[in-house]
Amino acid sequence: MRRREVLALPLAALGCNRSDRTVIGVAPKGINSIFWQAVEAGARQAGEEADIDIIWNGPPQETEYARQIQIVESMINRGVDAIAISPSDQNALVGIVEKAMGMGIPVAVFDSGINTENYVSFVATDNEAAGRMGCAKISELIGGSGDVAMVMHVPGSASTSKREIGFEAAVADEFSGLNIINKQYCQSDRARALAIAEDMMTAHPDLEAIFCSSEAATVGASQARKARGLGDKPKLVGFDAAPTLQQNLREGAIDALIVQEPYRMAYLAVETLVKRLAGETPPKLIDSPAYVVTAAEMDQPEIQKLLNPV
């Protein structure tokens, strides 16, 4: 990880000579998770370095796409110079994003995709590839064959949907020894994910592994595994790096985490908009890698920087 190099980018030079204050609105799909706190920190760091103002506002829950539309509408009405958004729904947010672009307000999409090409840049992990990574790790953990289940996130969320698609595609064409016997959405609710995982383990006592496509799903499923005291079965592979998840990884309730760089994604999204406002043409797609992290390597300095970027 080379976070210092990211932070060293000359953002300040792009904003320091303006006589008025540039304002960029940042609209995450939710605010109630450690992931989004890291996103906020990255956006605000980029804003500070560029000497611009950041308006941060998102719905309490990632399922509230109507509220996110209202938030972006409010930013447009306020007259922000640009908007960075992580769409809570890949279809529902198309209209408001295209409205902003049509009014000359550049939009950067980050973390989760949207079904339009009418934006400045898309900064994200290749989530389908990340889902495939999770599948490969589960296959490794259970010796290549066995029954597996999926605790999924929210229908319509592009990022998590692609992870789920990637996982299933990997089963179909690379890891045919795995048998997906159950899959359910937790609706971004940890308590619901816990209940779903408990039901899966009860209904399928020979379940070999569970794949979780989001932080909420992973937190709930790992709590269920700890509560059942099932030792090393079923194996559990999930997403993101909240402190609770790191502790569960260390204790063995999670076998591996697929970790993104939310701080960096938000930083780059804001940086992209600053460059666009300065007359530059940023890349249409900016990749932010994902990494598989296990307990055995989590104390390595480079992994700690990845797990705890702020």
Image (spheres, grey):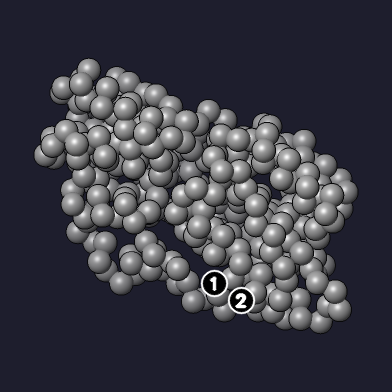
Residue 45: x and y, percent? 59, 71
Q: Quadrant of the C terminus?
A: bottom left
Q: Which residue is mark 1?
A: 6
- State whether residue 122 is above or below residue 62: below
The kind of residue tagged 1 is: Val
User: Which residue corresponds to the image point at 61% horizontal and 43% vertical from the top-left?
Assistant: 59
- State whether residue 85 is above or below residue 221: below
**Within the image, what quadrant is residue 232 found in?**
top left
Q: Nearer the viewer, residue 289 or 205?
A: 205
Q: Which mark is residue 159?
A: none
Q: Nearer the viewer, residue 140 or 38?
A: 38
Residue 47: x and y, percent? 66, 70
User: Which residue corresponds to the image point at 26% horizontal and 39% vertical from the top-left?
Assistant: 223
The kind of residue tagged 2 is: Leu
**Marks 1 and 2 close (CB-CB < 8 Å):** yes
Q: Nearer the viewer, residue 301 or 165?
A: 301
Residue 84: x and y, percent? 68, 54
User: Which residue corresponds to the image point at 34% horizontal and 41% vertical from the top-left?
Assistant: 218
Spatial distance from mark 1 to mark 2, Cα to Cα?
6 Å
Residue 262: x and y, percent? 50, 57
**Within the image, what quadrant is residue 116 found in?**
top right
In the image, 39: left or right of 139? right
- State whether residue 136 is above or below residue 18: above
Neighbour tally class for label 2: few under 14, some 14-19, many 20 plus, Cα within 10 Å: some
User: Which residue corresponds to the image point at 37% horizontal and 61% vertical from the top-left?
Assistant: 307
Q: Which residue is mark 2?
A: 9
Q: Decide if residue 169 is in sight here.
A: no
